[in-house]
Image: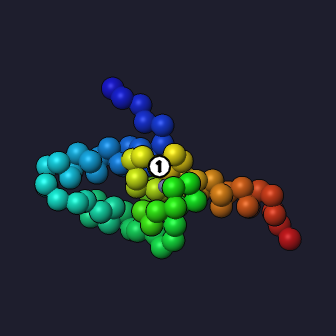
Amino acid sequence: MRHYRSMGEAVGAAMAHNARLAASATRPEQIGFPTVQGHCPACGRTSLFLGSGGYITCARIDCPEPDAASTLLERRNATEGAR
Ligand SMILES: [Zn+2]
């Protein structure tokens, strides 16, 4: 049993597995997750997708912080709060 640090890592591993089976590039939307426009705040790549629970997650397995976009949004909410 392996524990994943984050959604991105878990999905990335799943994608890598799928890619090996299909022998072709697997995109997040092909495994049921809609892609998100924009760049990942952590790695700067356009590999964001909407994960389960509505969290924006980076699909790159080598991303230093796959949930950086969601963290950023939550932080913004927390600091700016109700105006
Ligand atoms: Zn990233």
Q: Which element is circle 1 on?
A: loop
The residue nearer to you, when weighing 31 against 43, is 43
The location of residue 53, given as percent across then percent down, is 50, 56
Report the amino acid beneath label 1: Cys
- Residue 61 in sight in this render: yes
x 43%, y 36%: residue: 4
Q: Residue under circle 1?
A: 63
Q: Which corner quadrant of the image does residue 59 belong to?
A: bottom left
Is 70 situated left or right of 62 in this image? right
Give the mark count: 1
The location of residue 1, given as percent across then percent down, is 33, 26
The residue nearer to you, when weighing 12 against 80, is 12
Answer yes or no: disc 1 within 8 Å of ligand 1: yes
**Looking at the image, which residue sits at the far top?**
1
x 77%, y 56%: residue: 78
Quarter of the image that includes the C terminus: bottom right
The location of residue 68, given as percent across then percent down, is 58, 53
Residue 29 drawn above or below residue 6: below
